[in-house]
Image (cartoon, coloured by chain):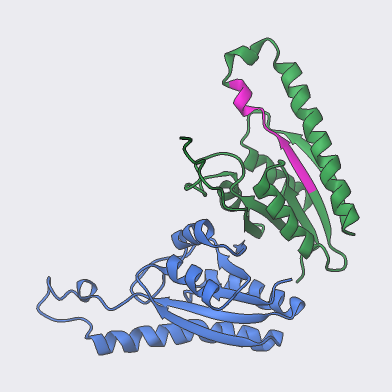
Amino acid sequence: MSYKRILVPVDGSSTSKAGLKEALKLARTPGARLRLLHVVDESPLLSLPEAGYAIDTVIDDLKRSGKALLANVAKSVAAQGAKCEIAMVESVGQRVADQITADAKRWRADLIVIGTHGRRGVQRLLMGSDAELVVRNTTIPVLLVHGPQVRPAKAKR
Amino acid sequence: MYKHILVPTDGTRLSDKAIKSAASLAAILGAKLTGFHVLPPYNLAISGYEIAPVVVFSPAEYRKATTKSAKAALDKVEKAARAAGVRYESLIVTSERAWEAIVQSAGDRKCDLIVMASHGRRGLSGLILGSETTKVLTHSKVPVLVVR
């Protein structure tokens, strides 16, 4: 059993890059292909009253940057000789993790590679993140890759 | 790619899944497989010494029972490794905290991947995994493959 359909969520963070790096190694096996998935996370906007009148503009911006991110990552993946496709979904009121597992199921992924910790949370609370939720919510094998250690910002004197 | 895969097992059927994945992955990658089992240290509290007049387990009996269960758990890994035709070794570590033992041993043995099941159970005979998985995920420096 070798992994052939590898789903990699990308959000531009350093941890997500660590996940992608690992996925690329696996994608070198013959017949393997990657799917780069970007979830446009609208949830932070919904809690901002200011976003109310301009929410569509902001979401459009998010989509645009998501698209640019995917294109960028796809280019570097292709440059390294791996086959990949890109996909973007909106979180539409769902958790990012749910969108990831749903997409994995739809695409019939046989592996999800995900960097921990994604973007939220305190440095020490590494789990309790989207990555952990993905592990909990899917029966597909998940490869969790640690991103570079984040050091707490030093106090300025 | 991965050269040395650590597969912690608690002997349960859930671990079987991890063992199977680890063995076939090792075969594809030409990696070595290390079966790993954590034994909780002997502890009077679990022997019932204080609540019952009869000591349920003496240290020797405890060692015998846990060694037996560890061997049974690791035998499965060896069998899978043999069937897949991969190099194999086993490791038993006594520790209060399974996750710590797993993370540390992965480092000591220079493993570059840990394969684990996502839920296990806890019990007397060294069956510690599962909630441990989360802690391993949090602390491991090497990638962790979680299977169900």
**Chain identity for the colour green used in the image:** A
Please indicate whether residue B65 sits to the left or right of residue B110 in the image.
Answer: left
Please indicate whether residue B137 sits to the left or right of residue B24 in the image.
Answer: left
Residue extending furthest left? B53
Q: Position of residue B76 (x, y in %)?
A: 55, 83
Q: Is residue A51 above or below residue B136?
A: above
Q: Position of residue A39 (x, y in %)?
A: 72, 37
Q: Is residue B10 above or below residue A87?
A: below
Does residue B14 appear in this view? Answer: yes
Please indicate whether residue A64 sits to the left or right of residue B144 in the image.
Answer: right
Q: Position of residue B73 (x, y in %)?
A: 49, 81
The residue at the point 74 percent across, 17 percent down is A56
**Is residue B63 inside the magenta stretch?**
no
The residue at the point 58 percent across, 81 percent down is B34
The residue at the point 65 percent across, 89 percent down is B82
The residue at the point 58 percent across, 13 percent down is A49
Chain B's colour? blue
Q: Is residue A47 above or below residue B111?
A: above
Does residue A101 appear in this view? Answer: no
Q: Position of residue A152 (x, y in %)?
A: 50, 44
User: Quarter-wise, where is residue B48 in the image?
Assistant: bottom left
Q: Is residue A144 above or below residue B78?
A: above
User: Quarter-wise, where is residue B1 in the image?
Assistant: bottom right
The stretch in magenta equals: A36-46
